[in-house]
Amino acid sequence: MKRALRIFSFLLSIVIIISLFAGCSHNSSKKASVVNTKPFSKLKQGSEVPNDGIITENNRFIMTWNSFYSQVVITDKQNNAVYSTMPIDAMEIKYDEDGYEIMNNIQIESPLIVNYYNPETLSEDKLFASSDAIKDGKIFSEEINDGIRITYVFTSHEISVPVEYRLKNDCFEISVDPKEIYDNGESFVTGVAVAPFLCSLGNNSTDSYFLIPDGSGAIINPQSIDHIGRQGGKRVYGEDITVNKFTLTSFEEKMNMPVFGEKHGDTGLLAIITSSAERAYINWDIGANAKKYSSVYPFFKIRGYNIIKRPSGFMMSLAEIPIFDDYIVEEPLTVEYRVLDKENASYSGMANIYREYLLNNNKLKKQEDSDVVGVFRLLGGTTQKTFHFGIPSTKLAKLTTISEAKEIAEYLSKNIKDEIMLELIGFGESGIDVGKVGGGFKIAGELGNKKDINSLAEFCKSNKIKLFMDFDVIGFNKRGNGFSPSKDSAKSYDGQTVYLGFYNNVSRVAEGKTKYVLLSREKLGLASAMAAKTANNYGFDGLSLSSVSNVAYSDYSTKGCGVSGLLSEYVTKAYSGIAKDTSIVSNNANEYSAGISNFITETPTVSSQYDIAVRDVPFYQMVFKGYVPMSASSVNLMADYDIAVLKCIESGIAPTFTLSNNYDNSLAQTKYSAIPLSKFDGLKEKIVQTVKETSVITQKVKGASIKNHTVTENGLRITEFDNGVKIAVNYTEQDLTFDNMLVPAEKYIVLEG
């Protein structure tokens, strides 16, 4: 039977390869990596694991070894808190009422989970170090500077993975070097989950919760759910858009930051993924009665992959089949764990610690005080199909011309006396649709001429309006300005050009039948520089790079850029190349672009609202507010306008509006759901009223950081800023009180410090 399965797998693999790669050459000279896992037959086993006792220590921590469970244990000398790769209280021997020992679920004792490709099922399976290495395989150790390396050998599958545990001055670190992974080449490693129950809580623990950076931030309580609980995960910085998707998914917020944490009473942990964050997922395992513990943990992809549909005629349960690269990533997979104490054992404390980490590592710098009271994203044009004597063609439908943008600016300036921002979206040759790189680096003639542009720029400069133009420098499908879709596009791991479906430059979603490609990583700097030059030539205050700031994608034509790797480095380099001469606006920005932007628009104000999450928190704003000026998600596109405005007030940030001047029924058939909701004429009075209300708050907390954020038992949300201002927001339908002051239902109050 096993032989038959192997033959079947081999034949199916041949069919897949032929159908997927026929007619293409394997461009190995431009591979993102030429390193593979080492052959298991050459594995040299090291020393036996140590006995119980101290492995190493420094001024802050003691690292010990628990030989009974084969676990590394970390003790914090400052508060005597103890942490381990399995829940500490699960190490206690317990007995049931009949005197029998209560056994732990094997998964909570696993310091490592390995994903591997199973050639018999053509899918990914998992190995748990607790059962498949510690119990049924073997482990061995090696002393390293400030710690120990434990190699977990999964004998039955001929796989071994080394994990390094290190003490640092202010944290402890766990890391895996993919280049030191061994497998037999058939059951090969595709990913690893590091310390899945280090950041864990007992089910139904009181005064305890997890933080995940989903959207603005989400809090998860470790409540028992059922026997199996809820398991899931989300890619840091967003899903790799080069990977095929065959099912439609509902809209979800992104995880913009490589950080998560847990709080338990006066202690807790903040985990920061410090290396290979682009390849990481933040996973969760919540409320399983069988495990008795809930956890949040990092998982890393180490091998490029794609998804294909199951070939017709093959009897198998899988509708989709993963196809993996021959090579693995080379960058270490590293997570640092910072201990929380009484003063910072909260998500507010986590935000403060993470912000300090970004500052200390030059990932964040305080920008000049350039807050605005409102951001107005004006949509330029969109391509429309037309027919002339039955012959199809396309034209640019004008949503907002440059002259109309000036009229909008005049109205806003007259009615809003404070500083605002205009962001021109889709004013290039192809509008908000994909065309040439950067929209051809010019404003479409249908939308305005040089005289119109100069008039708009001069008006904005003299009326406290910051003017920016957005350039899509990632998605393109036409040759021009020195860029070719065939030569300058990102490549898949087999050397082919990656072709994707329609790219919505407003929602950043790929859909439909229109094909486009992604710009090669090596060209990002050049394209960004060309966009900056265009913005400067037009006399604008700067440029918006919304696509660069929040989209994750792989490019196997460039070393190290497989599995979305090194995206942060290339974006940082592109930003640095233009930052001296122009201001940069990012949109819903990932951490690496947020920290070096001059302004962030469309910051997330809600989470994806998974059923495991008990509430949203403004963690994103708590990290960046006061250092990078920002505005919230477009309030006129949110399901509940009034609640969206309250979200701005809660964080002390400006509202954003996505607007257009023209709309007719023919545009209802376009791919952009935002267009019918963006008509300026029907919103202008409401916009002015909203900005006047929120500007009172944004001016009070201008340049201030969020010092603390709490949610009371009755649901009142309190934001305290470092300049002493407090805001109490009531999202409930009942009147509440704070400091003996009434907070009406769905309203707020402001208290001066």
Image (spheres, rainbow, N blue to C red):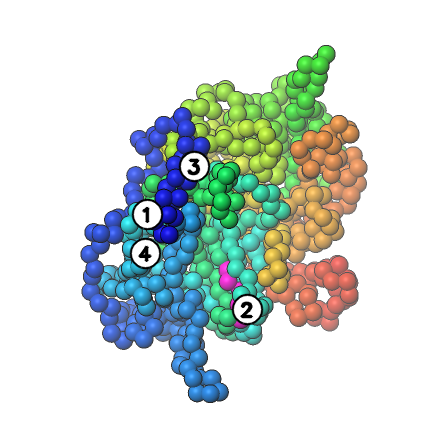
Residue placed farthest to the bottom in the image? 98
Give the quarter of the image for residue 585.
top right
Lower sequence index among marks 2 and 1: 1
Q: Amino acid at mark 2?
A: His
Mark linked to residue 623: none
Which residue is tagged 3?
16
Sequence-first tag of 4 and 2: 4
Quote the CA–CA distance across marks 4 and 2.
29 Å
Please give the name of the residue rendered at 34% of the width and 63% of the height, measured from the top-left corner.
Answer: 132
Around disc 3, counting alpha carbons within 10 Å, would you say few (fewer than 14), some (14 to 19), or many (20 or more)?
A: some
- The type of residue carrying mark 3 is Ile
The stretch of residues the image draws in magenta is 284-289
SS type, badge 1: loop
The reply to whether residue 732 is in sight is: yes
Q: Residues within 10 Å of mark 1 (few under 14, many from 20)?
A: few
Nearer to us of marks 3 and 2 is 3
> Can you tell which mark lies on residue 157?
4
User: Who comes first in sequence, dot 1 or dot 3?
Assistant: 3
Residue 314 or residue 172, whichever sits in front: 314
C-alpha span from label 4 to label 1: 9 Å
Q: Position of residue 534 (x, y in %)?
A: 53, 25
Callout 2 secondary element: loop
Whether the magenta-drawn stretch holds residue 286 is answered as: yes
Q: Residue at x 63, y 18 (%)?
A: 445
The residue that label 2 is drawn on is 227
Locate residue 667, reporting x and y percent. Answer: 73, 29
Tell me, yes or no, whether the two marked residues, 1 and 3, touch with CB atoms within 8 Å.
no
